[in-house]
Amino acid sequence: MRLGFFFSLLFFLSSLHLLYSSKMENKTWFYIQSNKTSHVISASRHIHSEGLAPARSQVHVYVPLQTDDELWTWEGQFIRNKATGLVLDIRKGRLRLIEDTEICLYQEKPLEEASNQLWGLRDSTSSSQGKLIYSISNADWTLMQDGDKLLLYPQESMEPADTWQWVAEASFPATATSATTIATTTTTTATEWNGPVTPGLSSSSSFEADYPQGLSPAKRGSQGSVSLYSMDSFKDYHDRLYLEKDQHLR
């Protein structure tokens, strides 16, 4: 009897795996590529090389190798990774003003509990290329590249934010081996946007190429310097953190 139960359970699990695999294979997959560096958002390569557990692992931005680690798809407002099946998640669900707000991979949560896993796209006011990727629960915080890490950072109107383009798997240049090659073959303007459409798209304007003072916005966020924030923004975050006790800010 126990043996029969074991085989029934094995058959059930195998069926679930086949159903999940079929569902994943039928999706449209994209590379999410930085317009500034031409690097792509990716699951950590340490998952394979060092046996790192995928859940809660840091999400990175790498020179593309065109692996499943670098492929993503939209499911509603979740962004799911092909290699792991996990979704983009704000680590511990909290925004940080002094420390980096890191992005990790995690299991998809029920929608009513998933505020830190929901994302949207909108045009940038400082770039005509690609889109900003922002947190649905905190729309003024957008995804940024800092070195090889993917972080969430508050968008400032006076500073250019990172923009991203969604390149379909089949459209990604197969022979590209350098950031320069990729940049010259995948440039996309706002009027030529071929990526997925999500709620919250708006207009865009001019492009500013370089960050001032030699620091990316995400790195500046970890400096803790009031002078690098507008005073209005700093006061707003201060009030939310200390007076209103916003649980998303820590």
Image (tube, grey):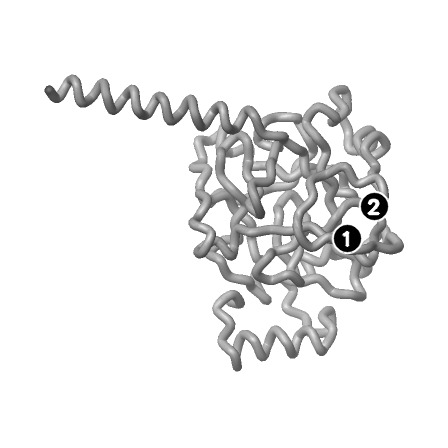
Q: Position of residue 202 (x, y in %)?
A: 77, 55
* Residue 146 visible in this rendered orientation of the protein: no
- Cα gap from disc 1 to disc 2, whole angstroms: 8 Å
**CB-based contact (under 8 Å), mark 1 and mark 2:** yes
Q: Position of residue 57 (x, y in %)?
A: 49, 43
Residue nearest the viewer, comparing 124 with 35: 124
**Left or right of residue 9, residue 203 in this image:** right
Mark 1, residues whose alpha carbon is within 10 Å: few (<14), some, or many (≥20)? Answer: many
Q: Which mark is residue 62?
A: none
Q: Quarter of the image containing the N terminus?
A: top left
Q: Name the residue located 60 percent from the left edge and 51 percent from the top edge.
A: 119
Q: Name the residue located 72 percent from the left edge and 33 percent from the top edge.
A: 167
- Image position of 239 with respect to 65: above or below: below
Residue matched to label 1:
123
Residue nearest the viewer, comparing 107 with 14: 14
Residue matched to label 2:
190
Mark 2, residues whose alpha carbon is within 10 Å: few (<14), some, or many (≥20)? Answer: some
Q: Position of residue 153 (x, y in %)?
A: 65, 59
- Image position of 7 with respect to 109: above or below: above
